[in-house]
Structures are given as C-alpha cells and as structure tokens.
Image (spheres, grey):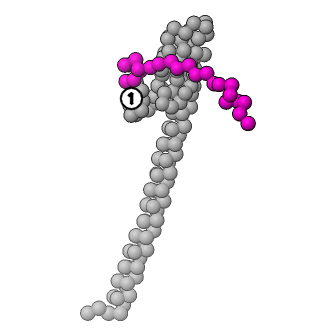
Amino acid sequence: MITQQNFLFYGIGLLAFFAIGYVLAIIQSKVWEEKNKQRSLNFQRGIVKGKISEQIAPYLPDFPKDLNASEARFIGNPIDFVVFRGANDKNISEVVFVEVKTGHPHLNGNESSLKDTIEQKRVRYVPYHVSAEVFNQK
C-alpha cells in the first residue's frame, strides 16, 4: 500500500532525478557547443593559413628553387601562380603554372582540368587591340 509519505518520497526522488537530468543535459549542451565552436575556429584558422600561404608561397624557403619569386604573379583562381621564367632578364623562356596546396594535396575539378589542359598543350596567346573608338564614344 502506498502511503502519502511514500508517495511524497518517490515524487521528490523523481523530481530530483529529472532536475539532475536537466542540469546534466545543459552541461552537456554547453560542452558540445564549446567543442563545435573550437572545431569551427580551427577550421576557419586553417582556411586563413591556407590563403596566406598561397599568397606568400614564392617567398617561403621550400618554394621550388628553380623558380624566381619576383617572376611569379599571383592569380588565385583557378591557379595560384603563373611564373614567367626569364622575365627579370627580359627574355621569357618558360611559363610555369603553380598550384599551392596546404593540408590535403588533392586537386579540385577545375584545378584538375586545368592541369590536363596545360599538360596537353592546349594553350594559346591572343593579342587584343582596343579600338580608339571605344574611348571616343559619347
């Protein structure tokens, strides 16, 4: 037989059980939120480090020694650098495309197709002369 005293005791126990569960859920939620925030910050830091590394790559000590940093031009997308070998001597002998990778070394679809295009020598030079009429229009 359940007495009023037993009912009160079980009720308080059940209430305490739910209160403790609620507090633990809040604590777990805060821990999860902090872990996600830290994970997100680390991811963002990685992106920023990668972007900075891409732009200063020619000045880093492990950049290919046969390429001169002053002959490199940052493009960014779809390729990071175009190096005009010999430009400093006013005699370009080679054009080198450089893709800088930090973290994962995999090429994305655009980078991969550009690599194939260059390797298959499907490149060309197109001179373009702007007509004076373009600037004389009113």
Q: How many marks?
A: 1
Compared with residue 109, is residue 62 higher up or lower down, i.e. above or below? above
The residue at 48%/17% (across/down) is: 96
Image location (x, y in percent) of residue 94: 49, 11
Image location (x, y in percent) of residue 67: 52, 13
Q: Secondary structure at mark 1?
A: helix
Residue type at tag 1? Ser
Q: Which residue is mark 1?
A: 113
The boundaries of the magenta stretch are 116-138
The residue at 61%/21% (across/down) is: 129
Closer to the camera, 16 or 72?
A: 72
> Looking at the rendering, which quadrant does residue 86 occupy?
top right
Closer to the camera, 9 or 11?
A: 11
Image location (x, y in percent) of residue 40: 49, 47
Compared with residue 109, is residue 74 higher up or lower down, i.e. above or below? above
- 131 in the magenta segment: yes
Quarter of the figure that contains the C terminus = top right
> Looking at the rendering, which quadrant does residue 3 occupy?
bottom left
- Image position of 70 (left or right of 65): right
Quarter of the figure that contains the N terminus = bottom left
Closer to the camera, 8 or 15?
A: 15
- 79 in the magenta segment: no
Image location (x, y in percent) of residue 97: 48, 20
> Looking at the rendering, which quadrant does residue 48 occupy?
top right
Compared with residue 50, is residue 65 higher up or lower down, i.e. above or below? above
The residue at 52%/20% (across/down) is: 126
Closer to the camera, 122 or 105?
A: 122
Work out which residue is located at the far left of the displayed protein and give it: 1
Q: Main secondary structure of the magenta part?
A: loop
**Would residue 45 be seen by someone viewing this image from the given angle?**
yes
**Would residue 105 be seen by someone viewing this image from the given angle?**
no
Compared with residue 43, is residue 51 higher up or lower down, i.e. above or below? above
